Image (spheres, rainbow, N blue to C red):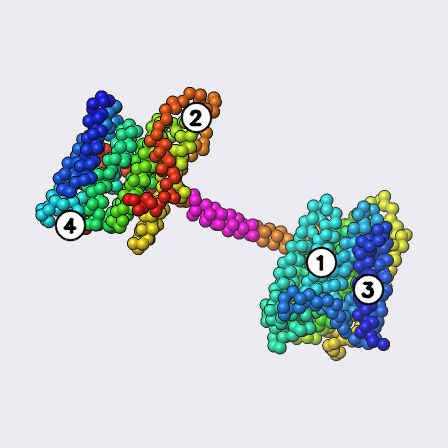
Amino acid sequence: MNPTLLINSLTLLTLTILLTPIILPFLFKNFKNTPQVTTRAVKTAFLISLAPTTAFIYSGVESVACHWEWKFIMNFKIPLSLKMDQYSMTFLPIALFVTWSILQFAMWYMASEPYVTKFFTYLLTFLVAMLLLTTANNMFLLFVGWEGVGIMSFLLIGWWQGRADANTAALQAVIYNRIGDIGLILSMAWLASTFNTWEIQQAVHPHQTPILPLMGLILAAAGKSAQFGLHPWLPAAMEGPTPVSALLHSSTMVVAGIFLLIRMHPLLATNQTALTACLCLGALSTLFAATCALTQNDIKKIIAFSTSSQLGLMMVTIGLNLPQLAFLHISTHAFFKAMLFLCSGSIIHNLNGEQDIRKMGGLQKMLPVTTSCLTIGNLALMGTPFLAGFYSKDLIIESLNTSYLNTWALLLTLMATAFTATYSIRMTILVQAGQTRIPPMVSMNENNPLITAPLTRLALGSITAGMIITSFITPTKTPPMTMPLITKTAAILMTILGIVLALELSNMTHTLTHPKPNPLMNFSSALGYFNPLVHRFFSKNLLEKGQNIALHLIDLSWLKKMGPEGLAELQVAASKAATSMHTGLIKAYLGSFALSILVMILMTH
Amino acid sequence: MNPYATSIMTFSLILGTTITISSNHWVLAWTGLEINTLAIIPLIAKSHHPRAVEAATKYFLTQAAASALVLFSSMTNAWVTGQWDITQMNHPTSCLLLTAAIAIKLGLVPFHFWFPEVLQGSPLMTALLLSTLMKFPPLTLLLLTSKSLDPALLTAMALASTALGGWMGLNQTQTRKILAFSSISHLGWIAIILVYSPKLALLTFYLYTIMTSAVFLALNKIKALNLSMIMTSWTKTPVLNATLMLVLLSLAGLPPLTGFMPKWLIIQELTKQEMTPAAMAIAMLSLLSLFFYLRLAYHSTITLPPNSSNHMKQWYTSKTPSTPTAVLASLSILLLPLSPMMHAIV
C-alpha cells in the first residue's frame, strides 16, 4: 500500500473539510452556517487527520505535494506545494483537536453573542491560515499563512469593537507583528536572490549562512512569538474573548514564529552567532515574562505571561540546536495552555465577568471539573513528572545543563523555571483554595456538557500527549543519556523550590501585616516599565522626524522659501533699494552723471 | 495753447528731427538736437503747474548737458581725425563720450534719473512725444556710429537698464512713471543689440513706438493718470480697456502678440554672437517688467474696483471715434505673423 498517496490525499481531504463551512453557503442557498456546523466540520477534520498521521508514523514517509505553479517571472517559480513531514503531520491533528475543543467550548461561552456565526467563521479562517503556514513548503505560502494569522488575530482581538482597550490592543498586535514581518521579508528577499527559489529544501548554504537573513528570521520570530522587545502585544491581546486567547495566543499563532525557525533550521544550524542570539533572547524573554507574571492579578494575564515565558523556553531550545525538542514542547504546550485558558473562561463566565484572582477563592467546591483541570494544567505547565509538560520541559532543561553554552542563559532559564512554579501555585491557591472572596449572589454551575467535554478531553491530552508523541516520533539527535545527579534533578529541584516559595508566601498572607512597597515588586507589576518607555519614545520620534523632514524641510523651506516666496522677497528688497536712490534732486542726478562718465573713462583707459 | 504757438512748436519738432536724421556733419546733428530740446520745453510746461515747470527745468538741464557733450565728443574726434563725418567716428574716447551723451539723451542707466520725473510732470500726449519722437534722433546717431561703439559698455548699460526699469516699475502707481520705466527697459533691449545688428535695433524701436503710442492714446482717452483711474474706467470704455490689456501684454513680449517679435529676434541674434549669458540675463530681467504690465492689464480688465458702481455700464460716454488708437492697437497686437516682412523692410 503506497503510504505517500494516502498521506497526501488524506491531508488534502482534511484541509478541504475545514473549508466547507466557508464554501458551502455560496453553493447551496439554504445552507445555514451555524456554530454547530463549524464545530462538526473541525471535529470531522480532526478524525480524518488521524489517518495520515498514523500512516506517517507507520511508514516514516515524508512527502511534498505540489498542486499548482505560479510562474510570475521567467525563471522564478512559486509552486503551491505542501510538505508532509514529521512537524506538519504531528501538528495537524493536535491543532485540530485543540481547535475542536475550543470551538465546542465557544458554543457555550459566546452563546449570547449576536454575531456568533461570524466569530466562528473568523476562528475557522484563522485555523486554515495556520494550517497553511505549517504545511507550507515554500516561503511564499508560509508568508500567506503568516499574514493570514496576523490579520485574523487583529480582527479577533478587536472583536468587541466598542471597547477602546480592545482596539488599542489589536492595533498593538498588528504593529508588533508588522515589525517582525520586516525581518521575514528581508529573509525572503535574501533567499530569493541567493538561491533563486523560495523552497525551503533548496536553501542549503554550503558554508556558514550569512548573519543578515538569520537576523531577519529571528526578528520575525520575535515579533510573532512575543520575545523580549516585541512582547507587549501578547498580554494586551487578552482583551479578546477567551476562546480567541485559547486558540491564537496560546497554542497556535504565537508558535508560528518558533515554527518558522524550526523549518529554517538547516540554515540556522551553521551560524553559531545566530544560535547564541536565539539562546540569549529566549532566556531573557522567559525570565522577563515569568517575573511579570508573579505579581499579576488578572487570571488571563497570568496565563498570557506564562505563554510568553514558555515561548522564550522554545526559543532557548532553538538556540540549543534542538528543533525537534522545540516542536515537542509546542505540541505539549498546546494542550495544557488551551485547557488553562478554557478553565479561566469557565471561571470568568461563572463569576459574571470577574477576572481578578483576588476576588476569587474556594472555587474547588463549586466548580470541581474546572478546578481539577486547572490543577492538571498547572502541574503539566510546571513539568510535573510524566505529565505532558515533563517530556518536553525536562528534556530541555537537561539538554541545557549538558551542553556547551552561555552560562547566563542557563541561569536565567533555571530561574524562570522556578518562577513558573511560583506563579502557577499562586494562581491555583488564590483561585481554588482557601476562603472564598466572591460576591455572595452568584449562580455558578458547570452542568453544561459544552464546558466539561472539551475540558476533559484536553485534560486527557495534557496527561498523555507527551508520552504518545515521544513514543512514536524518533528523535533526530541523541538525547543526553548520562549526567550527574544534580544536573538530572535540576528541573524538578527548581520547581520544588518555586512551589515552596509560593506556599511560604501564601502563608505570610495569613498574618495580616501590611505589605511594604518595594522596588522589585513595582518592577514586576509595572511589567518592567517597558510599555510606557518604548511606546511613547518611538512614536514621538517618528512623528517629529516626519514633521521636520516632510513639513519643515521640504514643504516650507525648499518649496516655499527657496522658490516663490524667497524670490518675491528678494525682488521687493531690490525694488525698495532702487526707489530710495531716486531722490528727485537734480543736483544728485547731474552729479551721478558726471561720476558715471568719469568712471567710464577711467575704466577704459 | 495758442494755435500759433502749437504750430510753431510742432513744426520745430519735425524740423529738428529731420535735420538730425538726415545730417552728415556733426554740427548739424547737434543743431537738430538743440532745436528739439527747445521746442518741446513749452509743451512740457504748458499747464503752469509747478510740477510741470520743474519737469521742464530738469529736462532742459539734462538735455543741454547731453547736447554739449555730443558736441564735445565730435570736436575731439575732429581734432584727432580731422573730419566731422558722423559715420567715421573712430577715436575711442570720443566714442565713449558720445555713448554717454546719447545715453543721457535717451535715458539709459545710469543716466536715466531725469526721465521718470519729466514724464510725470508733462501731460500724457507730451509724454508720448518724449517717449517716442524725442528718442529717434539720438538713436539715429547711435545707429550711424554703431560699428565703432564699445559693445561691453553698451551691454552693461542695457542689462542695468532692463533691471532697473523692472525693479523701479514694480513700486509705482502713477501710469506715466510706469511707462517711463517701461521705456527704460525697452531701451535696454535696443541698446544690447545695437552693435551686432543695427537693423534689429531699429525694428525694436519702431515696434516699441507703435505699442507705446497705442498705450498712451488709450490712457489719454480714459484720462488714467494712476492705477485707480484705470480700475474704474471699464464702465466707460469696456472695449478700450480690453484692447489696452492686449497692448500691454504685447509690450511685455508675450508670444502671439507683436511685442514678442523683437525680443525673440534679439535673443536669437545674441545667441548667434556667442552672448548667451547676456541673452538669458536680459530675458529674465524682463520678467520683472512683465509683472507690472500684468498688474496694469489686471486692473484694466480683470478686477472689479472696491468702489462698485451702481450699474455696470454708464449710458453716456464720449464716444468720439479715434482712428490712430485703433490702428496702432491693431498693429501692436496682430503683427507677429508678418515678422519676415517686417524684418526685411527695416
The chain to which mark 3 is attached is A
In the rendered image, residues at marks 2 and 1 fall on the same chain: no
Q: CA distance from mark 4 to mark 2?
A: 58 Å
- Which mark lies nearer to you, 3 or 4? 4
For image coordinates 77% across by 59% down, the residue present is A127
Q: Residue at x 10, y 46 (%)?
A: B83
Q: Which residue is mark 1?
A: A148
Estimate the x, y position of residue B313 in percent, counting from the top left: 46, 24
Quadrant in which the N terminus of chain B is drawn? top left
Which residue has dot 3 on it?
A14
Question: Which residues are drawn in magenta?
Answer: A541-565
Tag of residue B90: 4
Q: Nearer the viewer, mark 4 or mark 1?
A: 4
Task: Give the residue type that dot 2 points to.
Answer: Thr
Pointer 3: residues within 10 angstroms few (<14), some, or many (20+)? many
Classify residue A215 by image quadrant: bottom right
Residue A74 is situated, as x and y percent measured from the top left of the image, at: 63, 68
Q: Earlier in the sequence, mark 4 or mark 2?
A: 4
The answer to whether residue A159 is visible is: yes
Tell me the residue that label 2 is attached to: B235
Look at the numbered discs 3 and 4 and tell me whether their residues touch, using CB distance below 8 Å: no
Q: Amino acid at mark 1?
A: Gly
Q: Secondary structure at mark 1?
A: helix
